[in-house]
Image: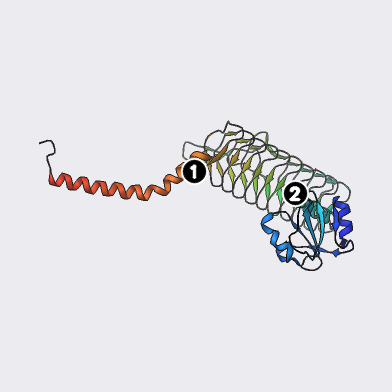
Amino acid sequence: MEFTAEKIAAFLGGRVEGDLMTVVNTVSKIEEGFAGSLSFLANPKYTSYIYTTQASVVLVNEDFVAEHPISATLVRVPDAYKAIAQLLEFYNQSIAKTGISDKAAIHEQALFGENCFIAEFVSLSQGVSIGANVSLYPGVVLGDNVTVGNNTIIYANVTVYKDCKIGADCIIHAGTVIGSDGFGFAPQENSAFKKIPQAGNVVIEDNVEIGANCTIDRATIGSTTIRSGVKLDNLIQIAHNVEIGENTVIAAQTGISGSTKIGKNNMVGGQVGFAGHLKIADNVKIGAQSGIHKDIDQKGAVMQGTPVTGMRDFYRSSLMFAKLPDIQKQINELQKKLNTLLTQNPNPND
């Protein structure tokens, strides 16, 4: 699809500085711009590239002041970063697929709304209910009684086990598994482990995005719950009966043990590990590779480390870590001096 600078400005509520009829049909990074592409400048560290880019149209903030001539046509908008996100969302919607493949396996009691895309080798089981404008890519499997809200996109090879609920406007990336059994086993007298049936489900509310190859276990009883607006990176493990609050974002390779409750508006770095049955307050920030072994009760706390502590305390400890070799060297030298003194005077009390 092709767009003129004039149409882009009209869509974004911006204004053109240059040729209104400049045409673009793709996007590029500003440092790699080429003729016919649209780019943007949002981060000041990339400002130098706007004077050399070959992109035909560049989105810039309204307050941008050029210090040198620019060959590209500019579209000035209140926030260039938000504007490019808005354009890309529009572009994705414009190329959205529709239609139902005759190679999909759809149970006669499965229901789906208008304008859905159901690709080849999708499997919809008995009692599945799908809203309008839903896209299911190849290999998606929805178990019995799964529900999916309007405008949700589920990419290839995602499996959703029975009775799970997915809200509207969600995105679930390839390879994710939702609703597999929680890790529940009861130790027996003979040291064996007996499986505890996992009778609950997973509830994912609206406007949630889940990365590739995540696993979200069903609850033992009740629901594992992902609240609206949550964003999960790739390769995240969420155990049974966990609850993640609204608008919380979690980076890759984080693991959350069973029955932990994480508040809303939290930010969790990569490779963070949560012990089970914890409660984390709202607006908490947790640095990468932290180990959370206790509740975090303070709203807005900034935490880091294993075991986790306040960020300032962690940095103080980190400074000491760097000094440990020198401290050890000093201790060794003092020990040598002490040994020498004891050799010279084996009976210091005499």
Amino acid at pointer 2: Ile
Q: Nearer the viewer, residue 313 or 1?
A: 313
Name the residue at 90% across, 63% down. 21
In this view, 63 is above or below 246: below
Q: Nearer the viewer, mark 2 or mark 1?
A: 1
Nearest the viewer among 45 and 210 is 45
- Mark nearer the N terminus (2 vs 1): 2
Q: Amino acid at mark 1?
A: Tyr
Using the rendered image of the protein, determine whether residue 98 is visible from the camera's viewpoint.
no
x then y, percent, for residue 162? 72, 43
Apparent side of residue 94 relative to residue 47 in the rendered image (left or right): right
Quadrant location of residue 57?
bottom right
Q: Is residue 24 left or right of residue 292?
A: right
| Closer to us: 220 or 216 | 216
Q: Position of residue 283 (x, y in %)?
A: 64, 36
- Spatial distance from mark 2 to mark 1, Cα to Cα? 37 Å
Q: Quadrant of the C terminus?
A: top left
Q: Position of residue 29 (x, y in %)?
A: 72, 62
Label 2: element kind = strand
For the residues bearing labels 2 and 1, Cβ distance under 8 angstroms: no
Can I make out residue 335 in this image? yes
For the rendered model, the colour scheme is: rainbow
Residue that badge 2 annotates: 171
Q: Residues within 10 Å of mark 2 (few under 14, many from 20)?
A: many
- Split into 4 quadrants, where in the image is the N terminus? bottom right
User: Which residue is at the far left?
Assistant: 350
User: What residue did someone put label 1 on?
Assistant: 315
Image mark for residue 144: none
Residue at image location 79% in from the left, 55% down from the top? 88
Taking the spot 71% from the left edge, 45% from the top edge, the residue there is 161
Q: Secondary structure at mark 1?
A: helix
